Amino acid sequence: MADTTDVLDKLGVGRIHRHVFICTGPKCCGEEQGQEAWDALKAEFSQRGLGQGESVCFRTKVGCLRLCQQGPVALVYPEGTWYGEMTADRIPRLVGEHVVDGKPVEEWTLAQNPLPAPGSGGKAF
């Protein structure tokens, strides 16, 4: 069994630049539509090599982001940008503009909730 430190290093933890969570339904959208969006996100990350290098980006498929409408719903951190209707055909633009270039796609944005900067005094509780 691998040492946890080795696994974390291999994954790029500590170098994560952005993290995209995408809800695949079934409450916010049909499961097929959610799976298609997830598959498109995986393919886009792979094509762009976003899971490796100095600025690693993560993607995580979730069953619910609690919005339960306008799905598939995506959430991009650290900006805390919530997106609705993130169908497979929209994923390349989301990845290119927001994940790679750091510019949220305003017309698809449902809400903003950025994480507090380290040392800013922002409290979780």
Image (cartoon, helix red, strand yellow):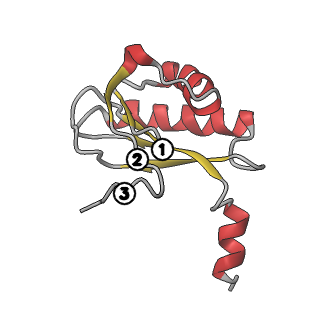
Horizontal side, residue 20 vs residue 81: left or right: right
Under circle 2, the secondary element is loop
Horizontal side, residue 67 vs residue 31: left or right: left
- Give the residue pinned by disc 2: 115
- Give the residue pinned by disc 3: 121
Residue type at numbered disc 3: Gly
3 and 1 marks in contact (CB < 8 Å)? no
**Image x and y of residue 36, in percent:** 47, 32
Mark 3 and mark 2: span between their CA atoms? Answer: 11 Å
Q: Looking at the figure, which quarter contains the N terminus? A: bottom right
Under circle 1, the secondary element is loop
Look at the picture and state if 94 lies above or below 57.
above
Residue depicted at x 36% and y 57%:
121
Residue type at numbered disc 1: Pro
Look at the picture and state if 32 lies above or below 66.
above
Counting residues from the N terminus, which is met first, the one under dot 3 or under dot 2?
2
3 and 2 marks in contact (CB < 8 Å)? no
Q: Tell me the number on the disc at residue 78.
A: 1
Q: Tell me the number on the disc at residue 37.
A: none
Look at the picture and state if 108 lies above or below 55.
above
Mark 3 and mark 1: span between their CA atoms? Answer: 16 Å
Question: Dot 1 surroundings within 10 Å: few (below 14), some, or many (20 or more)?
Answer: some
Question: Dot 3 surroundings within 10 Å: few (below 14), some, or many (20 or more)?
Answer: few
Residue type at numbered disc 2: Leu
**Image x and y of residue 88, in percent:** 49, 25
Residue depicted at x 26% and y 26%:
70
Which residue sits furthest right?
53
Quarter occupied by residue 109: top left
